[in-house]
Amino acid sequence: MKKTTAPKTLTTLKTAKTIIDANEFLQLRREISEYDAARDTIIKESRDITKSSKSAIYSLHRGETLAAKQQLVAAEKLIAKLLKEVEKDEHLRGGSFSASLEEYAEAKAFLRFLEDGTLITKKELKVVNAEEYLLGLCDFTGELVRYAVLRATARDKKAVQDVRNIIDAIHGQLLQFDLRNGELRKKYDSIKYNLQKAENTLYDLTLNPRGSKEADDA
């Protein structure tokens, strides 16, 4: 009887070393580990950027401009550091870091408005992209309304008028955008409500000008 031999299997033809490229998997493991470490750092330090920016806004509401500027400098140092990581992998920008940049843009916009009544540009901010800038402006209008309410209690009609005017200008520009469903669309809707609040506050002051800053100066 003729002796038969078992067919050779893949494992008998190739060793485990030649079936897969183990070195490539080692490199992939390193890349994933490095990405996770970088992401953890960005999440942690993005919280600090957000905290410093929020603190700056709070300081500005209290009239503490110097403190606000110092808090923004602290945020800017962290932003510069994290941007170096993001340059290596753009996927790291989304999420926490992008949200912190929106908060930073909001704080810088509020500072500029209080200093000279104008709107800071995206070009001047340098570190934010278009969406981060616009989302920051949407939130900025909310801070403007809070500021207007505070100025209204002091009967400062001009300050309230300035707030109303800049919110109206921002709203007018964004009205020309073809906004799709998303976060920017939702926040754009908040601008309309903030504009209405500013107009109502101004209207109330107009109805009752007695004791206003303008009347006192007359």
Image (cartoon, grey):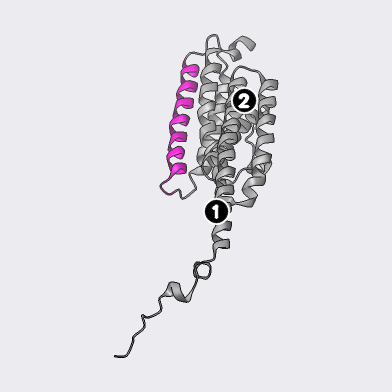
Q: Amino acid at mark 2?
A: Ala
The disc labelled 1 sits on which kind of residue? Answer: Arg
| Count of marks placed on residues | 2
Binning the other alpha carbons within 10 Å of mark 1 as few (below 14), some (14 to 19) or many (20 upward) gives: few
Please tell me whether residue 144 is drawn above or below residue 83 in the rendered image.
Answer: above
Image quadrant assignment for residue 60: top right
For the question of whether residue 62 can be seen, the reply is yes
Q: Which residue is mark 1?
A: 29
Percent position (x, y) of residue 78? 66, 35
Left or right: where 180 falls relative to 76 = left
Write down the quadrant of residue 166 in the picture: top right
Could you tell whether 83 is left or right of 43 in the image? right
Q: Residues within 10 Å of mark 2 (few under 14, many from 20)?
A: many
Identify the residue under disc 2: 56
* Magenta-highlighted residues: 180-207
Between discs 1 and 2, the one toward the N terminus: 1
